[in-house]
Amino acid sequence: MDVERISIIEDFVPKDDDALLKKAKAYQPQLLETTVRPIAAYRMTEGNKDCGMPIALDALSKQAFGAGDSVCLDFGSHWVGYCTLKVGFVGSHPDAPAYLKLQFAEVAGELDEDAETYRGWISKSWIQEEHLHLDRVPGELHLPRRYAFRYLKITVLDTSKKYRVTFDNIVCRAVSAVEQSSVSPLRCGDPLLDRIDAISLKTLADCMQEVFEDGPKRDRRLWLGDFRLQALINYRSFRHRDLVRRCLYLFAGTRFPDDRIAACIFTDNEATADDTWFSDYALFYPIALEEYLREYEDAEVLHDLSELAVLQIDRALASCENGVVSQAFSDAAFIDWCPGLDKAACAEGVLLYALPYAIVLANRMHDAKRAEHYAAELALHRAAAKRRYWNEKQRCFVSNEQVSPAAQIWMVLGGVLETDEAAELLSRIPQAPTDYPMVSPYMHHYYLEALLATGMQDVALAHLKAYWGSMVERDADTFWEIWNPDAPDASPYGGTIVNSWCHAWSCSPAYLLRSGAFSD
């Protein structure tokens, strides 16, 4: 999605099912709290902003800061929570408010960015920056907003000539639905993989709030594409069953008036569907439901949600033309943050990927006729997809004259090629030049899935280590929403200051590592 694809439906009124929303509310978790304090502090002065002088934490309260001075606090890792701090003074009694600027940053590089120069299409209100007047000094600041951060930089914009301020008792009340310590660390014999697993779990834990959020900095919403991956990782780690159930019910409980599942759900106040629909995300709902049922064999959830789930499949099939999804359907797909990506072959691949799950769901529903219909459609669409998109001369899938890794990956995941032929195709992706590369860890996950589906475990493991390992090399505490090692400043929004540096769709390595995907 880019600025041209922002969904705005005037007078959009979602269709709410009070019974399903009531069940979703019953599964809302009680968040766990952890008190976190900074592990290091650095003093910076005006005119010397690039060089910080370390401050012993037990001496921080004795440091005085005047106009232009800053202190940067390092909390040691990424956290999601609420901050408080005490502000004192030295000198004469304050005769004017203390004017402070607070910057919260998930990665250190955010502190170097100037919010005033940001001109991207995502609202700058997501930038974690506050300008505060403290009328009473000494006083205690209780910041009401929740922040996602590792670093906090406090700059004194002004006081008066009569006093300077001091800072003490700076605390974060971190929140999550789970405790990372409840999951045993991975001990696979490869320190890099162990580290990738730990960062993946930290990323997931910080995104597990009252729902599975896509990112705790931005957008703080329940997105269906992220949720499917989060649930998979959760099954191999925290096993928070109720949070998965809650999210499944939320997607069903508030939806488009024609029963399409919304791409995301707002949950800050009353749960309500966003007026955004991604055709590929909707197909992940029956997938996520079936994967949940494999874990828990939950008859109530099957009864409540299965019909709506397979309806997403039925709608996709009804939109098809000549055995493949329509242009309108593919245009409505997300797939990846790749400008100019043609999504026709990708969207068809997602439908083919979803149909086997729909067959199993239909059988769970004791609907043999529907299961047979889906099986027939699967065979029909695989054949039609190969006729439409396979280019024998180029030996790859061509989507409206465009060749992209995403099209190859989704056609392989859709089972269009035999295994050997699919493996040969995937083996050419790393060397093939393209103007439409994989952009997000989300797309890289499905590349790994495709490699694993074709028996290329060694190649998949090497790619996992290279791609996610490059974030580790850059001191990631959590994995990032967007990452291209060759273009580290890339952003689909017009500026990295609004990028999410703790993002749900990037933590799938923990699922793959813990599910035995790389076992011989």
Image (cartoon, helix red, strand yellow):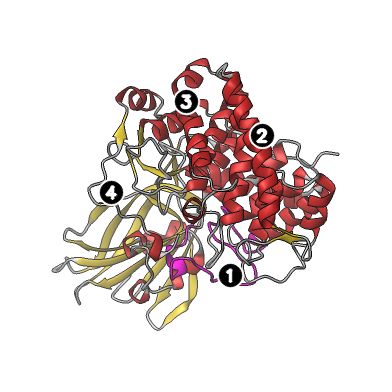
Dividing the image into 4 quarters, which one contains the N terminus?
A: bottom left
Q: Earlier along the polypeptide chain: callout 1 or callout 2? A: 2
Relative horizontal placement of residue 121, taking residue 100 as reference (left or right): right
Residue 187 in view, yes or no: yes
Amino acid found under the numbered disc labelled 2: Ser
Q: Earlier along the polypeptide chain: callout 2 or callout 4? A: 4
The residue tagged 3 is: 307
Query: Based on the displayed image, in which of its 4 quarters is residue 254 positioned?
Result: top left
Say which of marks 2 and 3 sits in front.
3
The residue tagged 2 is: 184
> Compared with residue 361, is residue 55 higher up or lower down, i.e. above or below?
below
Q: Earlier along the polypeptide chain: callout 1 or callout 4? A: 4
Residue found at x 75% / y 40%: 517
Place of residue 106 in the rendered image (x, y in percent of width and height, measured from the top left): 48, 58
Relative horizontal placement of residue 66, taking residue 404 as reference (left or right): left
| Bounds of the magenta segment | 471-500
- Inter-mark Cα distance, 2 to 3: 37 Å
The disc label shown at residue 488, or none: 1
Amino acid found under the numbered disc labelled 3: Glu
Amino acid found under the numbered disc labelled 1: Pro
The residue tagged 4 is: 144
Q: Earlier along the polypeptide chain: callout 3 or callout 4? A: 4
- Residue lying at the far bottom of the rendered structure: 47
